[in-house]
Amino acid sequence: MNVLHYFSQHHQEILELTWEHLWLVGVSTLLAVLIGVPLGIVSAHWPVWNKPVLGTANIIQTVPSLALFGFLLPVPWIGARADRLAILALTLYALLPVIRNTYTGIRGVDSSVMEAGRGMGLTPKQLLLQVELPLASSTILSGIRIAVVVSVGLATIAAAIGAGGLGEFIFRGLAMVNNELILAGAIPAAFLALSADFGLGLLEKRLRPQ
Amino acid sequence: MEQPSANGFVIEFHDVRYVLPNGQPLLQSLNLAVQQGETMVLLGRSGSGKTTSLKLINRLLMPSAGEVRVNGASTANTDLIRLRRSIGYVIQDVGLFPHYNVERNIGLVPRIEGWPAERISLRVQELLQLVGLDAEIAIRYPHQLSGGQRQRVGVARALAADPAILLMDEPFGAIDAITRDQLQREFLSLQQRLHKTVVFVTHDLREALRLGSRIALMEAGRLVKVLSPQEFLRSTDPLATEYVRAFGEGLNSVVDRGTA
């Protein structure tokens, strides 16, 4: 097999680019969670925010990824380095599933549970931390899972602007009409997506309330 | 907070109105006073304003006009969280926290009030016994309980921090007749020991007559009359007689069918 041969010869570079890929996906997902979960909470608690927040995230999602990289290029500090640019774009794409699932998860908490909690004298913060977020956690995690799987695929495009990652192989392979090279990028990327999906899926199942 | 006001009333409604944001009035000028240690039943059909009245006591709702006083102090001027923690609240759907086991459900308010762990655990055992549940049930989760057990846990949870006031919104409404009968009996014996001030919402005359020290009959957002169970049965008030007639007819129709 040519591909296996190529893999064994280039395992060092494959590992490096896989690591870069993971870094892009990891940092952008973390940022998306840090921004998206609070936004989801806000839109679930104050319905006025629901439409603007989810609407904006929806619109971002419709921008083609290459175009988004282009739009972000003139942004100061961000545009100066390709990896920053890639991370920002990936974060923006990951926001929608995170916000939407946080919103859905919190709105899905049984109203009698909330009424009992309020009636018992839980503060809004205690209600959020002890009731709403734990009960919404599996739904939120499933949003994060979708975000990660999509980001792993999208991050391959980041190579087009020189941000590195497994997309390097793919673009190089496309330019050189070399299938082994394309597969050297595509196979590890697919493997990353599948293992993230599987691992987070397990965690999600454990968090799901009975 | 623990002492009733000078006039001996624990809960007072003074000209309380409640109007929905869309302008629809749910409660019109309610005046009602609940004495310490009595069980005041709010009896009425759906839409009569009984649940609204109940929620005005622990400020799940704010009066649009008038004043609700608890232990002599207007609820509007009382710290909301302190007010609610000093009042036990039991609802028909119970609202147990599905991700907490029975022990954590019952011990939640004591825990956030900062009780030491041993004291909480003792209190939970004491309460389980009080509501007639086995100690082993403490480690179970709400979805593993029957409807009757769940409601008992709900009552235990409401009693956890030993509030002087208990609000109960159709607590036995979704429970089968035999278990309901048992829970009502247990409620009476519990009340004989604890002497809480209870406001109990129901649409069931039988339940009202059985549990209430007094019955506040409500209809379409108004308080019609406050009567003792004995007075209620003798009352010539058209609405009260309507309740008694409907109740009696339910029994008679069965008897008639048996003899026909």
Image (tube, coloured by chain):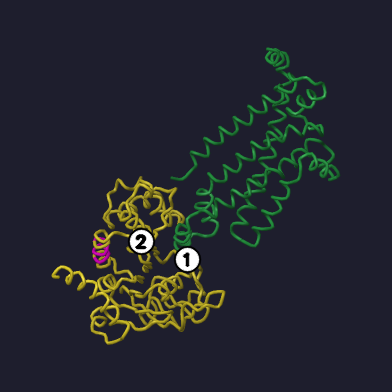
Mark 1 crowd level (few <14, some 14–19, many ≥20, 10 Å Cα) = some
The Cα–Cα distance between marks 1 and 2, rounded to whole angstroms, is 15 Å
Q: Judge from the rendering whether residue B194 lies leftward or rightward of residue B109; answer left or right.
A: left
Q: Secondary structure at mark 1?
A: helix
Where in the figure is residue B225, as x and y percent of width and height?
34, 83
* Quadrant in the picture for residue A168: top right
The chain letter of the yellow chain reads B
Q: Secondary structure at mark 2?
A: helix
The residue at the point 62 percent across, 56 percent down is A42
The residue tagged 1 is B82
* Quadrant in the picture for residue A17: top right
Q: Amino acid at mark 1?
A: Arg
Chain A: give its colour: green
Q: Is residue B30 above or below residue B154?
A: below
The residue tagged 2 is B159
Where in the figure is residue B118, as x and y percent of width and height?
37, 49
Query: What segment is highlighted magenta in the picture?
Result: B182-188
Q: Is residue B110 above or below residue A2?
A: below
Q: Nearer the viewer, residue B64 or B244?
A: B244
- The answer to whether marks 1 and 2 sit on the same chain is yes
Magenta region, main secondary structure: helix
The chain letter under disc 2 is B
Where in the figure is residue B29, as x and y percent of width and height?
46, 83
